[in-house]
Amino acid sequence: MKVGVLGGGLAGLTAAYELAKKGHEVLVFERAPYLGGQASTFEVEGTRLERYYHHIFTGDADMAKLIEELGLADRMQWLESKVGFFHRGQIYDFVTPMDLLRFKPLGLLQRIRAGLVTVYLQRFGDWRELENVTAQEWIRKYAGQQAEEVIFAPLLRAKFGEYSDQVTIAWLWSKFKDRVGSRSKGMTRELLGYMEGSFQPFIDALANGIAAHGGKILTGTPAERLTIEDQKVKSVTAGDVWPVDRVVATVPSFVFLEIAPDVPDDYAAQLREVSYQTAMCLVLKMKRSLSRIYWLNISDPSFPFVGAIEHTNLIPSEKYNGKHILYLSNYVSRSDPLYSASSEELFLRYLPSLRKINPEFEEDWVEEMWLYREDAAQPIITRGYSRRIPSYETPVEGLYLANTTQIYPQDRGMNYSVRLGRVVSELAAR
Ligand SMILES: Cc1cc2nc3c(=O)[nH]c(=O)nc-3n(C[C@H](O)[C@H](O)[C@H](O)COP(=O)(O)OP(=O)(O)OC[C@H]3O[C@@H](n4cnc5c(N)ncnc54)[C@H](O)[C@@H]3O)c2cc1C
């Protein structure tokens, strides 16, 4: 069978790899001149680095299995994370239950209450019973308003920006489960996984695996249009017209609707119901370190960014010739004035806040900077989301959709895109 795969991110590459292994004739169309999508990399100090900060959790079984199959298991490094909260001019460690108990911005009783609520949520069996309530309502009710404002709201803002008050508690439930899964037995530390030399070797190995099984990958080749006749997919137009028996689309839903305007109205309406937040990452290469923390949550609504992720506090800076790598992360909607800012403009906006984190910070610490923007970074997971998830099988025969809007209640991530790619490849191969 001839299968066109739209998108060369992890879902598309995994689907293509699985289909090629089964002997199908696979053709991957990727708009960008490189593969990897949101997990793609660029060069810094002679080594590869993700455009957006990336690590995996110890419970990411689908990723681990594929990494093993591709012969890359010995490149995985499991490193102790340093997570912190920045609140009112101070950095607080925030990895273990003891850290929460020591978290001074909340009174002792509030800390205990927040801890008990977190444990209760982690042990809660069925997310379906929770999904009709927002995280904000649920947390306010059980942990109290102050804990919600100081701890939980910043975590939600860090992913959903202005939509954070609409997010279902089922999402937070699953997020806590992932994080707890990555903790050591005594809960005294958290291990995060990163591949030696970035996740680029994983992307390369998938691409090589596709080619080794006769598949073809076209980068810099956006899919422009799908031809559908008698409710059956016939071809992909991408520069040329490519006849196909099946199409697996892993592009964001808004792109899918542009390429396939002829899908039946009901399905199209379902896709339109889910919107995305844009991620903006300003990556700084610095001669000094901003803080001792890898993942710094910002609990200060006056900050123009939501997280400061200092990659070189997870991976030693020696790997980057002694330079320090800092991602300043933001999630915005397209109407936000920050959305169209240049890297220099953003940096100037961020500068006073960087000085709040480290009063010694000087502009000349920064030797180079890059700005990356991803419009399909985060589907907005609102109440009752499970009822709005589009199916993998579209109403058009031979046409399948697999994108991050179908990942739920888990937080979208490489592990789940790999799973998505495998699951949709099984459907498309039937
Ligand atoms: C800021 C940020 C931080 C993240 N951190 C982590 C992390 O720490 N750990 C983790 O596991 N995950 C993380 N993720 C998430 C993870 O990277 C994604 O969930 C995963 O890579 C998505 O893969 P995908 O293939 O489903 O989608 P994508 O990577 O979005 O792939 C879709 C592909 O389709 C292509 N495309 C679009 N239009 C067309 C077209 N017309 N024709 C052909 N191709 C097209 C795109 O260029 C893209 O390559 C992060 C994501 C972001 C944005």
Image (cartoon, helix red, strand yellow):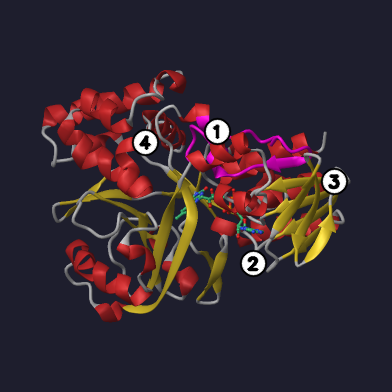
Q: Secondary structure at mark 2?
A: loop
Residue 137 counted in the magenta span: no
Q: Give the label on residue 245, or none.
A: 3
| Point 13% across, 41% down: residue | 104
Q: Residues within 10 Å of mark 3 (few under 14, many from 20)?
A: some
Query: Which label lies toward us, 2 or 3?
Result: 3
Query: Eyeballing the image, is 67 above or below 185?
Result: below
The residue stretch that appears in magenta = 388-411
Q: Which residue is mark 4?
A: 167
Q: Within the image, what quadrant is residue 259 found in?
A: bottom right
Instruction: Give, as a three-letter code, the residue at label 2.
Output: Tyr
If you read the primary sequence from the N terminus, does the residue marked by circle 2 or circle 3 appear first? 2
If you read the primary sequence from the N terminus, does the residue marked by circle 4 or circle 2 appear first? 2
Q: Which residue is mark 1?
A: 389
Tell me, yes or no, whether the two marked residues, 4 and 1, touch with CB atoms within 8 Å.
no
Q: Which residue is mark 2?
A: 34
The secondary structure that dominates the magenta segment is: loop
Query: Which label lies toward us, 4 or 3?
Result: 3
For the residues labelled 2 and 1, the Cα–Cα distance comes to: 29 Å
If you read the primary sequence from the N terminus, does the residue marked by circle 4 or circle 3 appear first? 4
Query: Which label lies toward us, 4 or 1?
Result: 1
